[in-house]
Amino acid sequence: MKYSRILFLLLVFPLFSASTAHKFYVSITKIEYVKEKKSLQIITKIFTDDIEDALQQRYDSSISLDTKKETEAVDEDVKKYLLQKISIKVNGKPVQLDYIGKEYDVDMLVAYLEVTNVPDLKSLEIDNKILIEMFPEQQNIIHLKTPTSRKSLILDKDEPSGKLKFN
């Protein structure tokens, strides 16, 4: 009797765990205000397969990320996509994001952006629509670090923008 219960659990448990498992859609953007350099240094992490799907749909169905097939044009597509999907206002004024580059870390695309000429940070408004057109349940998490504080936002389809204020 004991062995039949164990056998039953071993056979049934994978079925339950497989049916409840689901994929989640998230990006994480870390923004650090470096007062000495008067800049916002931005690192955005996005699942490689998700951004690849978005780039294929938007630009070219043959795009392949983190493979030997990746071309130099892909970097331009990543840049174009990110700069269309992320916008920032510092102290109520729009700022220009500079795309620095990208790399891969396991199953994530890690993109580097920067905003220069930020002498003081009193407020930051961010609009982050990364992958929202692809995945309605997409969440874009924003972490902002200044020399004196840390704040976070979770942005999604219903609220793709947020504002953080500092003293």
Image (spheres, helix red, strand yellow):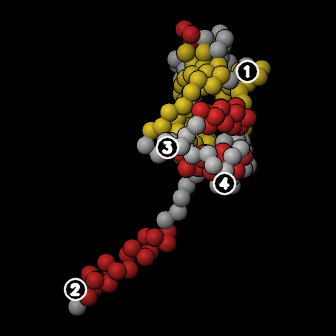
Residue in the image at 55% along x and 55% along y: 24
Q: Identify residue for label 3.
A: 67
Q: Residues within 10 Å of mark 4 (few under 14, many from 20)?
A: some
Q: Quadrant of residue 86?
A: top right
Question: In terms of sequence position, does the residue under pointer 4 or pointer 2 come before the other?
Answer: 2
In the displayed structure, would residue 16 be above or below residue 158? below
Rounded to the nearest whole Å, what is the CA distance between mark 3 and mark 1? 33 Å
Residue in the image at 67% along x and 18% along y: 122
Q: Are the residues at dot 4 and dot 3 in contact (C-beta closer than 8 Å)?
A: no
Q: Identify residue for label 4.
A: 135
> How far across and how far down the image is residue 89, in percent?
73, 24
Q: Residues within 10 Å of mark 3 (few under 14, many from 20)?
A: few
The amino acid type of the residue labelled 2 equals Tyr
Q: Are the residues at dot 2 and dot 1 in contact (C-beta closer than 8 Å)?
A: no
> How far across and how far down the image is residue 80, in percent?
70, 33
Horizontal arrangement in the rendering, residue 24 relative to residue 138 (left or right):
left
The amino acid type of the residue labelled 3 equals Thr
Q: Residues within 10 Å of mark 2 (few under 14, many from 20)?
A: few
Horizontal arrangement in the rendering, residue 120 relative to residue 31 (left or right):
right
Rounded to the nearest whole Å, what is the CA distance between mark 2 and mark 1? 66 Å
Question: In terms of sequence position, does the residue under pointer 2 or pointer 1 come before the other?
Answer: 2
